[in-house]
Image (tube, grey):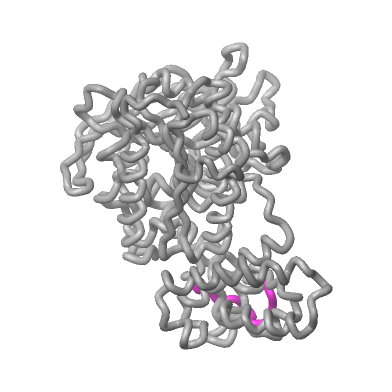
Amino acid sequence: MRKFSLLLILGLIPLLNHAQNIEIPLDTTVTTQHSANINGKSIDYTAETGFMPLWNDDREPIASLFYTYYKRSGVKNTENRPLVISFNGGPGSASVWMHIAYTGPRVLKIDDEGFPIQPYGIKDNPHSILDVADIVFVNPVNTGYSRAIPNEEGKINREKFFGVNADIQYLAEWLNTFVTRKNRWLSPKYLIGESYGTTRVSGLALELQNSQWMYLNGVILVSPTEIGLDREGPVEIANRLPYFAAAAWYHKALPQELQQKDLDELLPEVEDYAINELLPVLVKGGFIEDSEKQQVAEKMAYYSGIDKKVILQNNLEVPFRYFWKDLLREEGGFTVGRLDSRYRGIDAKEAGDNPDYNVELTSWLHSFTPAINYYLREELDFKTDLKYNMFGPVHPWDRSGNNTGENLRQAMAQNKNLDVLIQSGYFDGATTYFNAKYSMWQLDPSGKMKDRLSFKGYRSGHMMYLRNEDLKKANDDLREFIQNSLPGEEPAKY
């Protein structure tokens, strides 16, 4: 329940937007007080929304980043209070997704499986991690309300913001300002990123250590990308099969003997086949014996729900997009979603090898867009004529020099207190759960830090927290991870 709000505006920057001069607040704070029942306890908290500047080397503002900062009330010693810094992905996506659907104190009004319900709205999140940690949701430049500030010639230096390494470097600078202003230097700190946000936070872990001298206690990778780790060729092809099996199982497209197995029993079986039988065959390429190729295609069809003939026509390499189009072609002619294959879509034609649209993303925008615009304006009292960019103009994005996985490994090696948690949905076809496991296995080739890496899987898709059962489970996993990674007075040494 909101109790009061306070608005402080220290500066405004005019921006030409759609032929109108809309002013971007440079340094603005709106604070409201609330109360919620979280994890069985009544929690009072403040919600601070606002803009905070990004400075260049001459201490001039070059961007104004929008953030929402939740802080539990009545905490006297913040040195013992964890701070979770949350990013979404894209690149170009606002922080809206995890903000109002996962870890924040208020979440979307959706059904238990994550589908939109009208009238749109927002409700309390009884599973939020706000009982154990404060949270700040950060919107990179051109996402949400965040904007770059044009120079005197009215131009923006795009190279400063829109690339793998540029993104990491300027966000580290901004976080230094935020942590300093909010007096959180002594607090245990965690980064959580979803999708491309996992690339972002993996790189930030080392950048914060090396450039800002800020050391973390944990990094959480939600539906992680490849984070710069190589997996091309046979490995990438073999890694698809467990996801194919999971999606086919959900839609009851597998043979009966597989369909009657629980997912926890089925997936280890498919993973074992992919690693120990399929991968060695794929390595042979065009020199596979025909009899062996036939045998493998039959087994792949058995586990994927895709016809053996199709698998052979694709030389054992069925594209993701074809899978989404073909899995239910003979079962009602539906397509399945990319980011969450539980969702079904309708194309103009059943023929073809590629869905017309991303059915799951359409569904999510259906419910997230009205909710975040209402929530920020009416509940958090932040009012502006700026458009909230669910996806902002950040392209072209410079993807060169992506060593973020190696950066994360280095950060862990240099900081014994840094642990990593990976969370993935089994029905995610964009950043598959098995690729996430593969990244975890490859992140530390020495094997000396594997006890600080953990994986959690969920029976949903890319945004696994949309399913109510997984919303609780995933937040509980976060809560446990945070509590277990607090070292107390134990020295950081090997």
Q: Is residue 488 found left or right of 454 in the rendered image?
A: left
Q: Count numbered badges in the picture.
A: 0
Q: Residue furthest top?
A: 58
Front-lying residue, 218 or 58: 218
Residue 144 seen from this side? yes
| Residue 60 occupies quadrant | top right
Q: Does residue 345 belong to the magenta stretch? A: yes
Q: Residue furthest right?
A: 287
Looking at the picture, does residue 238 appear above or below residue 410? Answer: below
Residues in magenta, as a range: 343-354
What residue is rendered at 70% in x and 31% in y?
159
Residue 291 is situated, as x and y percent measured from the top left of the image, at 76, 85
Front-lying residue, 340 or 488: 488
What residue is rendered at 32% in x and 44% in y?
479
What residue is rendered at 60% in x and 28% in y?
169
Residue 442 is situated, as x and y percent measured from the top left of the image, at 60, 49
Residue 182 is situated, as x and y percent measured from the top left of the image, at 37, 21
Front-lying residue, 283 or 258: 283
Front-lying residue, 328 or 413: 413
What residue is rendered at 62% in x and 81% in y?
299
Q: Does residue 303 belong to the magenta stretch? A: no
Residue 488 is situated, as x and y percent measured from the top left of the image, at 31, 28
Residue 392 seen from this side? no
Give the quadrant of the N terminus. Answer: top left
Q: Is residue 470 found left or right of 429 in the rendered image?
A: left
Majority SS type along the magenta span: loop
